Image (cartoon, rainbow, N blue to C red):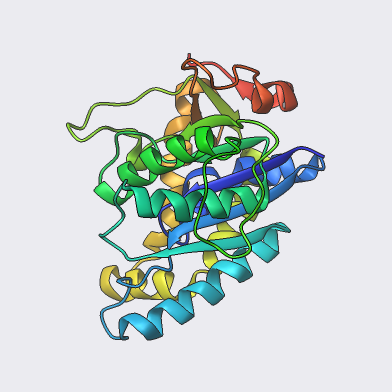
Amino acid sequence: MTRLLSFMAHPDDSEILVGGTLFHLKSLGWEIGIATMTAGDCGSATCSREEISIIRLHEARDAAAYLGACYSCARLNDVEVFANAENLRLVVEVMRGFDPDAVITHSPVDYMIDHEETSRLVRAAAFAIAIPLYETRSVPAAPPARATPALYYADPVEGTDTMGNRVFPHFYVDIAHQMESKREMLSRHKSQRDWLREHHGVDEYLDRITGWAEQYGRECGVRYAEGFRQHLGHAYPHEALIQSALPPFIRARL
């Protein structure tokens, strides 16, 4: 059974950026895990950080269960996700606990530092998890992973870098038949959906992800799509795990 871990910064990031693809792979028998750096402790204008963390962790577990995935949190704080040695040990411990064949994380360039630093941490951890002499502080510590996993980057939020330029993916995944499941999974994050709906008067939480998926779909000739790049640097696997698993649904840019 192929094991894929989507490791993002906050609860709901996996649903927003790669939810359709996760449903695709789950239907093929892949074991899916979702992990976040934080519990979303700054995601409220009315609750305390402790209260919203409890709420959002529950929502994240519920959303993962809807997919049939497990969920883990590294328990860092919002706006304080930084690529340093102590945080790397936490991320390695989470990743070793799942022992993935492939990992998806944020684009190295994105709209906020939490996403960019998550990308750096997951990239470093993907390399470190199989090194026997790299030790974490957990007791008992998870054993080293079997191998370095294939590493993928999701599209940045809105598909652009910090200067507003489109960051084009290496490939797209057609998620037309998974779009409703993606929307339902995201709707399990009720605290965020209600907060945005109250402030904007529309169901912006779901409408935005639908609009982005439509945009990416237009770029490759389908109704809805999600975009990915694969990390192909030295010592990282070059095997096209996701691409070869979904050949009927992989699309190139028009």
Residue at the location (36% across, 71% down)? Answer: 197
> Where 90 sits versus 156, above or below?
below
Camera-nearest residue between 68 and 251: 68
Q: Quadrant of residue 191?
A: bottom left
> Where 79 sits versus 211, above or below?
below
Q: Residue 141, percent across and down?
A: 61, 58
Residue at the location (69% across, 63% down)? Answer: 66
**Residue pushed farthest front?**
133
Q: Is residue 239 left or right of residue 133?
A: right
Residue 222 makes an appearance in the image:
no
Please tell me how many numbered marks the rendered image carries.
0
Camera-nearest residue between 172 and 89: 89
Residue 36 makes an appearance in the image:
yes
Residue at the location (41% across, 48% down)? Answer: 88
Q: Residue 120, percent across and down?
A: 37, 38
Q: Quadrant of residue 161?
A: top left
Q: Is residue 65 left or right of residue 162?
A: right
Q: Residue 39, percent across and down?
A: 43, 68
Camera-nearest residue between 85 and 220: 85
Q: Residue 121, percent across and down?
A: 40, 43
**Residue pushed farthest left?**
163
> Where 218 sits versus 162, above or below?
above
Camera-nearest residue between 175 and 235: 235
Q: Quadrant of the N terminus?
A: top right
